[in-house]
Amino acid sequence: MAQGTVQVTHTGTSRWRRRTGEYASLAAALEAAADGDVLTVAPGTYRENLVVQRSITLRGPEGAQGSVRIAPADGVPLTVRASAVVQDLHVEGQDAAAPAVLVEDGTPELLDLRVVTRSASGIEVRGSARPTVRRCTVDNPAGLGIAVVDGGGGVFEECEVVSAGQAGVAVRSGAHPRLERCSIHQAAGSGITVTGEHAALEAVGCEIYEVRGSGVQVTGRATAHLTDCDVHRTTADGVTLDTDAVLTLADCRIHDIPENAVDLRSRSVLTLTRTTVRQFGRNGLSVWDPGTRVDANQCEIFDSTGDYPAVWVSDGATAVLDSCRVHDVPDALFVLDRGSRADVVDSDLSQVRNTAVSVSDGATAQLDDCRIRDAATGAWFRDHGSGGTLNNCTLDGNRTGVIVTKGADPVIERCTVEGPSEAGVYVSAGGRGSFVDCRVTGSAGYGFHVIDGCRTSLRKCRTERCARGGYEFADSGPDAGPESGPQVEDCSSDESGGNGSRTAPPVRETAVQSAPHSPGLLGSIPGQRTAEPGPPAASPAPAEPARTSQAVLGELDALVGLDSVKREVRALTDMIEVGRRRQKAGLKAASVKRHLVFTGSPGTGKTTVARLYGEILAALGVLEKGHLVEVSRVDLVGEHIGSTAIRTQEAFQRARGGVLFIDEAYALSPEDAGRDFGKEAIDTLVKLMEDQRDAVVVIVAGYTAEMERFLSANPGVASRFSRTITFGDYGPGELLRIVEQQAEEHEYRLAPGAAEALAEYFTKLPKGPAFGNGRTARQTFEAMVERHASRVAQLPDPTTDDLTLLFAEDLPQVS
């Protein structure tokens, strides 16, 4: 068969056999062909606009796929209006206003087509057409990849959109295709978009990735159902729903998304089943607006790469999580705004850096049979009108189990808080809440800590092994009315780990703590009436004697280097001590501002000196406890207006009587602040430092230049911090001394020549911004110990010297 000709084979036995033969053009062959004929096209380029209107087979030669090019100058290269078979063609179009392949009618089969074009769309299906499209490839950097419109349908199997100037697959105007095992990537718009009432899409086993818009977009009353699909590596949201859209995701995987993994608004409805969402830059699920709803069953949301809540529900939306797991995220679930609601059943929230469940601005959360583990805060009901229920939940290993503040009023029933590092339950700032049949065990702080006279209800609650006490009800203040304070009924404690148990009286009473401290036993709280005297409270164990200021200064002097820092601290100590003596003598004492700024590189001992400074002030009677509470931006700055002030107040309260050490404080005032809430933390801090000036010493720390920006962020900041102490970098000799101390502490010795090699090593070590100073010295020692172990492990019978001596060869290489 000559190149550029068409072989037409008539498969019937009738008198029309004369149609068999070769034709000089495709148009002539198509004109002569009838239903059932096979048109085999010879290799070559055909500048014709083909229209297939009969049930024929149009194909390229076997074994030469892609050798037939259909490439007219304009218009639609290939139009199919019948139940034909079109196979093994290479289609090229140049008309930006027309598709490259247009299917308008019938149930044709398009097999192994390669569409390389710059058209309005690569393949377009419309009207009553219901094609089966198999193993076809579309490369259209100028327009849509595949468009199914105006009621069109059909099945696309194992097809690939390798590039698209707009959406990879667009479904609109009542169309309803099905995609099976298709791949869509390199689209300039959404991977798949489904738009308009009665438009619907079903996709099974498909992959959407490397698109410059959303992976899947469903809008305007359209519906879609995705099963066993992957959506990943988008530049916008992974999945977007808007305006009454309905989407079902079953056994899908959404990951590596820089924005929201799933975002839905305006009365859209999403159902997820056995779907995983991971590695997302903003929210895993972002749910907005009244009538918008998410139902997730047996799903997993984890491994956030940003600083946003994994599940965000706001503006009256609803989210339901049933048998789900949310873990390794900054915050797990945030529910905001009146009318917003989250229902969580039999789910796990774990490895949460900040708050697992946050309820604010009048929203509601209902958690049943859930487990919350390893979070800074298990559940936080933040403000007036916010509430809901925690029922039969376990909160394990969190810093604080439940926080209730600012008029929030949740119901907590049959819940267990295990091993909190600060408090099981903390209620403050007018928070309320009802706690029924709840238990706090193994708290490093209090079991239930209720301050500010909050009218919290406790019924049938119990605490066990709480280090500071089972219950602490702080002073309501002189203006508190008779109805202030918690209401307590049938609660008990094991006396913070003692052998007996104490039980509150069966009559419901208002318990008001009138002394600043309580022994932690509910039965012996002052102001709570008892029917008859209970057993005497156990005498508190004698406290360990505090060190004198001179003893602490001795430890400071023993630190390597820091000569100027030691002089500054001694000068402060002397000023305070002399001021005390002048006051005793009836003389005026100079005012000493105790808040400090520490500047310098990481690893220069700032945290250690802050701890010793607090202990010195406690020894001098300036601070009550002298303990150190270390925080950074993530501990102080919240996610929305108002939450930052609460976090900052909480940190200040924890540091009461001691030192609040804010590391990298400059992060609270970023250069491009915009709507950043760091300024709110600074403003709150300045006010607290003024209102409670004698309660807490605040030390802010960070790089020298960045701390200058911090001090200028608020007019009151610089006036609060009148003294700056600069921590200089350690020299090679000082780093050597730190390694020698580490070696002595761990029973190692430096072999002859090792000290000189260490000094040279520290001299050559690059001093970039990541240089860790003291931390670098410790890491160097650890590296030497590891190399020593690798060397000595090979010896059959090592001596004591072998086991203890570190040689120059154990040093790591300078990178």
Image (spheres, grey):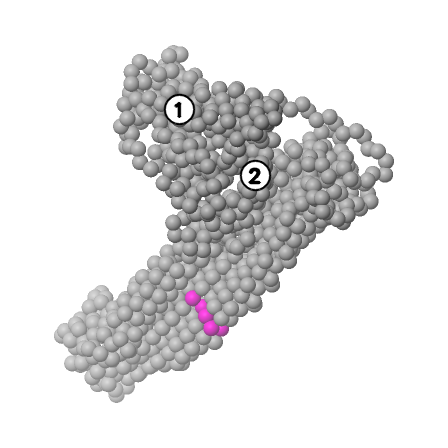
Residue 689 x/y as whole percent: 54, 41
Instruction: Kindly identify the residue that appears in the image at 31 percent across and 36 percent down.
Output: 768
Quadrant location, the C terminus: top left
Is 221 in the magenta?
yes
Q: Secondary structure at mark 2?
A: loop
Q: Is residue 275 left or right of residue 18?
A: right
Q: Quadrant of residue 230?
A: bottom left
The image shows residue 8, relative to residue 361, as above or below, that is below
Q: Secondary structure at mark 1?
A: helix
Residue furthest to the bottom in view is 15
Of badges 2 and 1, nearer the viewer stands: 2
Q: Which three-letter amino acid code belongs to the residue tagged 2?
A: Arg
Q: Is residue 777 left or right of residue 621?
A: left
Residue position for label 1: 563
For label 2, count other residues whose C-alpha is less than 10 Å away and answer few (under 14), some (14-19) or many (20+).
some
The magenta stretch is 217-224
Return the disc, 2 or 1, that comes first in the chain's sequence. 1
Residue position for label 2: 693
Instruction: From the image, give the main secondary structure of the stretch colored magenta.
Output: strand
Find the distance from the CA under tag 2 to the CA under tag 1.
Answer: 29 Å
Along the line of sight, the residue nearer the viewer: 51 or 501: 501
Instruction: Kindly identify the residue that appears in the image at 52 percent across and 31 percent down.
Output: 590
- Residue 530 seen from this side: yes
Residue 153 x/y as whole percent: 41, 75
Residue 666 x/y as whole percent: 42, 43
The image shows residue 13, relative to residue 763, as above or below, that is below
Instruction: Kindly identify the residue that appears in the image at 30 percent across and 64 percent down.
Output: 163
Q: Which three-letter amino acid code belongs to the residue tagged 1?
A: Asp
